[in-house]
Image (cartoon, rainbow, N blue to C red):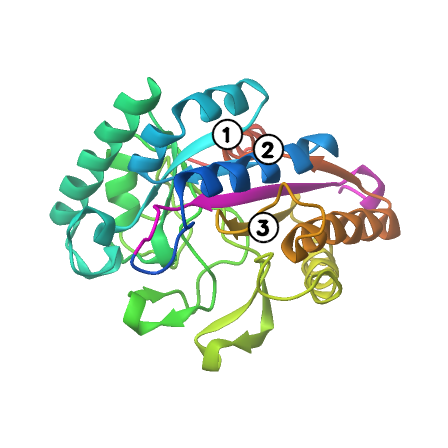
Amino acid sequence: MQTSRTRTLRVCFTMDCEQVAAHQGGPPTWEYGERSIRGFCEALLAQGMGATLFIVPVGAEKYRAALANLAGAGIELGLHYHPQDHGYNDFLGAYTGAEQSHMLSEAKVQWTQALGREPLVVRPGNFSANDATFPVLAGLGFLASSASCPLRNFIDAKANWTGAPLDPHFTHAANRLLAGDLPLFEAPLTVDWESFMWGGRTPLELRIEMVDARAHGYTVRKAVKRQLDSGIPESVLVVLTHSVFDYSDPAEFRRQVLDGLIAEIRRTAELHEIAVRSTTLLELREIHLEEGVGP
């Protein structure tokens, strides 16, 4: 059995890159959104970290040049999808499998045409999904997703994840709350499973803009201890933010939270004598396959 000295803490920083003036909020302009994305990635790269960017299709068109440069620096690019951005009137989890397949296929084509590559990782807006979603994503060729927020019970957004696994896993063909043998790998957002916000609709998430760095440090320590105690092969943190904050400005509060969170993660790793490694979703999938965990 592995000891804590041989373990690794994998950290997946992610950003949802939203449409301007989106129905639930987005950057005020495309220029501001690009500054947010660049600032986030550059802040991470300066500290030896990478990120996964989930980008709406029109964002892929608007940010084409910037994204090409960032991808060359080791940033992973994926699809972010809000049905409302495409003229639909509800969240993804409100639609049948056939409807989701049609909607996501159109978005994937638009994204691919913009960037000259197919997205292999994906996140639906608001973590909205139902039991049809993972089989649909697998059928469309996606290899990894970050579609779940464990314990979220947000009925209005059709995002119901009570009982979902807290840790990365391969997905199930019939039930979104179970691990299974689909080739689609899921990396849930890291949460504090005992603290809730928004009137109990969601747990305290490792979402940069939700609380300050000190509070996030508590979630980090708690999550890492649980994972180490459980003996899983790799400890994993999945961090979230959105392209609505100016991460290029060191005085911006959310940039300060990002810097503070990285410090909290490193202190936690030092406490447990484990190495910190930044990773993307596809890299994490490959690590699990190498460990013999998967289909």
Which segment is the magenta one? Answer: 1-22
- Residue at 51% in and 34% down: 285
Q: Give the quadrant of residue 148.
A: bottom left
Where the C terminus falls, by quadrant? Answer: top left
- Image coords of residue 76 (percent x, y): 50, 29
Q: Which mark is residue 239?
A: 3
Residue for point 72% across, 60% down: 213
Q: Where is mark 1, residue-wise?
A: 76
Residue, far bottom: 199
Quarter of the image with the N terminus is: top right
- Kindly identify which numbered label has been placed on residue 291: 2
Visible in this render: residue 293? no
Q: Amino acid at mark 3?
A: Val
Taking depth in this image into account, of 11 and 186 the one nearest to the observer is: 11
Badge 2 or badge 3: first in the primary sequence: 3
Front tag of 1 and 2: 1
Q: Spatial distance from mark 3 to mark 1, Cα to Cα?
A: 14 Å
Q: Please tell me whether residue 4 belongs to the stretch shown in magenta.
A: yes
Q: Report how far apart the C-alphas of labels 2 and 3 lie in the structure.
A: 23 Å
Where 26 sits versus 280, above or below?
below
Taking 12 as reference, is 114 left or right? left
Number of marks: 3
104 relative to 162 in the view: left or right:
left
